[in-house]
Amino acid sequence: MGVIGNDMLKYPFFNIFITNHFETEKFYFQCVFNSSEIKVPKNIDVITHIAELKKDKAISKSIFFSNHNDTELKDISLLLSIAQGTHIFSEHQNLGRISNDRKEDFELFLSFEIGDFLDETFKNLSKMKREQLDVIKKAFLIFYEAKHFLFYDDLRIILMMNCFEFIIGSIYRQDKNYNKNDLKLQDSYKHIITKFDYQKYIDDKIKNEIKPKKLSVFKKGNKISTISSFVKQFQDMRNWIAHGRQHKKPAFKGSPSDLEFTFLYRLESFIRIILIDLVYGKDYTRKFDILYQLILERNVVFTPTPEFPKLRFC
C-alpha cells in the first residue's frame, strides 16, 4: 500500500451508501455503485467508492491509531462509520466488527456535505492540544467499540450510557479546568448543550419556519419540551439499569418513545451529534431533524431530510 504519492494511487472504500461522487482536498471519491438498483444485504460488504489520491498529495499517518501501518484512510473509515451510521472502511485500513451483519443507522451527512466534513475535521484535529485530542480519540473509539464490537448486544445501552457520560464529563472538566470527583451529570449536560447552543439552534430553526407565529405560543400549543429534559430520562434509565432492571422500567411521562430500545436509538443519535460537533463544528442539513425529531421526540419514527441522488448511471 502506498503512503506517499504522486502516482494517483487508488483505494477502494466499502459501504459508503450514497449514489454520488465527492472529493476532499486530498482525494477524489468516485462512486462505483448505484444503490437505487440493488439492495445490499447486511452481511455483505460492497465497494461503493474508489478514493484516488490527487496529484502532489501525500497520505498522512493516522491521528486516531498508533500502529505504524495505520494511515489517515483508517481515520476516514472511523469518521465516516460514525457519521454515516454503518461500518465503512478502506481496504487494508479496516477497523473491523464482531458481527457478520453491519449495523445500519441513518446518515448524518448528505453527499454534498461529506467532503467538507472530512476536510474541516482533519484541519481541526491537527490544531487540537494533546489533552483535547486524547478525549476525542477515546470518545470516538468507545462509541465505535460499543456499536460494533459486542458479542452480547444487550450490553450496548450500558456502554453507550458510559460513553455519553465520559464525553460530556470530559469536555466539562477540560473547559472548566475541573479536577474534583464530585462532578454532577446535570452540570456537565447543561455545559454541553450550552457549548453547542443546541436549544438556541432548535428555537431559531423553528422560529424561521413558523413566521409570523410567536415561538412561545407555538411551543406551548404543541407541548414541545426543552432539550434539557433528555437528561432526566437519561438519569431515570441509568438508575433503573444500574439496579439490574429488577423493578418496572421508569415511565417517561408524556413520552411517545417509552421503550428501552427507542431510548437507546435516541441516545446513540445524540452521541453522534455531539461527536461530530466536537470535531467538525459546522452546521449540516440533518442536524435539526435529529435534535428536533429524536431528542425532543417530535417524531420517534424518524423521517430525515432525504438525499436526492445527482448521479445517473447508464
Image: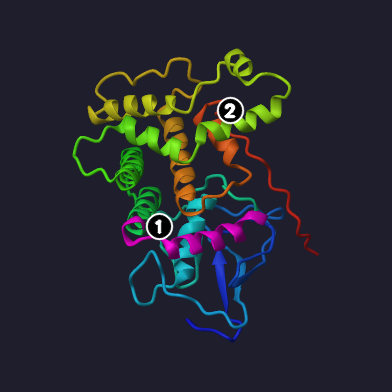
Q: Quadrant of the C terminus?
A: bottom right
Residue 97 coordinates in the image, percent (x, y): 40, 57
Q: Which mark is residue 299?
A: 2
Image quarter of residue 30: bottom right
Query: Given the current orientation, which residue lies at the most extreme left position?
Result: 181
Residue at 33% x, 62% y: name it: 130
Cα–Cα gap, marks 2 and 1: 30 Å
Residue at 73% x, 53% y: name it: 309
Q: Is residue 303 visible?
A: yes
Q: Secondary structure at mark 2?
A: loop
User: Toward the viewer: 68 or 228?
Assistant: 228
* Residue 36 to residue 63: above or below: above
Amino acid marked by disc 2 = Asn
Q: Which residues are magenta?
A: 111-132
Q: Are marks 2 and 1 in contact (CB under 8 Å)?
A: no
Label 2 Cα neighbours within 10 Å, binned few <14 / some 14-19 / many ≥20: some
* Residue 99 to residue 251: above or below: below
Amino acid marked by disc 1 = Arg
Circle 1 sits on which residue? Answer: 97
| Secondary structure predominantly adopted by residues drawn in magenta | helix
Residue 124 forms part of the magenta stretch: yes
Q: Is residue 87 visible?
A: no
